[in-house]
Image (cartoon, rainbow, N blue to C red):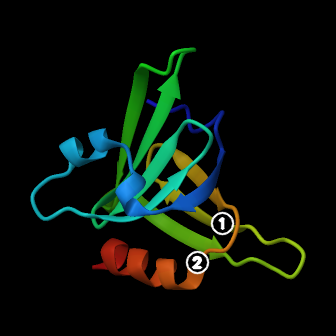
Amino acid sequence: MIDFQKSAVFKLKPIDNSKAREEFSQFLIDGEMIVGTFKTVRDQVVFTNKRIIAANVQGITGSKVDYTSIPFSKIQTFSIETSGTLDLDCEIQVYISAVGKVSFEIKGSFDIVKFNKIISGYVLG
């Protein structure tokens, strides 16, 4: 499992959902679909309509991957921070029972307000 206490902020870049790791599709249950895909240099995070799944690539070869799933039902609070004039990054923060705060910093052009509405529907629905 990803140590969220040591990896308090995930610095991510949005990518097309079709570029998500193939393995993510193996974890999805009936009716679950990816609604947002983000990456770092080696790691990826997907938001589905039911949870957040993080893929943490390990080792020099990258053949070992740790997958952590955060069900929306375990999110107690969440917030967004929009980008500013000089600070173009935006941020999603989720507070998860038994884990604490996890921050996802998204670099570049991304419609965080639209994405917040999508995620809100799943968390609150």
At horizontal 19% and vertical 62% (from top left) the residue drawn is: 32
Within 10 Å of disc 1 (Cα), the crowding (few <14, some 14-19, many 20+) is: some
Q: Are marks 1 and 2 in contact (CB under 8 Å)?
A: yes
Residue 12: x %, y % from top left: 62, 53
Task: Tell me where residue 118 sits by quadrant.
Answer: bottom left
Q: Amino acid at mark 2?
A: Ile
The numbered disc on residue 91 is 1
- Numbered label tally: 2
Please give the name of the residue rendered at 39% of the width and 50% of the height, measured from the top-left corner.
20
Q: Closer to the camera, 8 or 88?
A: 88
Quarter of the figure with residue 22: top left
Mark nearer the N terminus (1 vs 2):
1
Q: Is residue 18 left or right of residue 3?
A: left
SS class, disc 2: helix
Residue 122: x and y in percent read 32, 74
Q: Amino acid at mark 1?
A: Glu
Q: Which mark is residue 112?
A: 2
- Residue 11 lies, in percent from the top left, at 67, 50
- Left or right? Give the position of 92 relative to 77: right
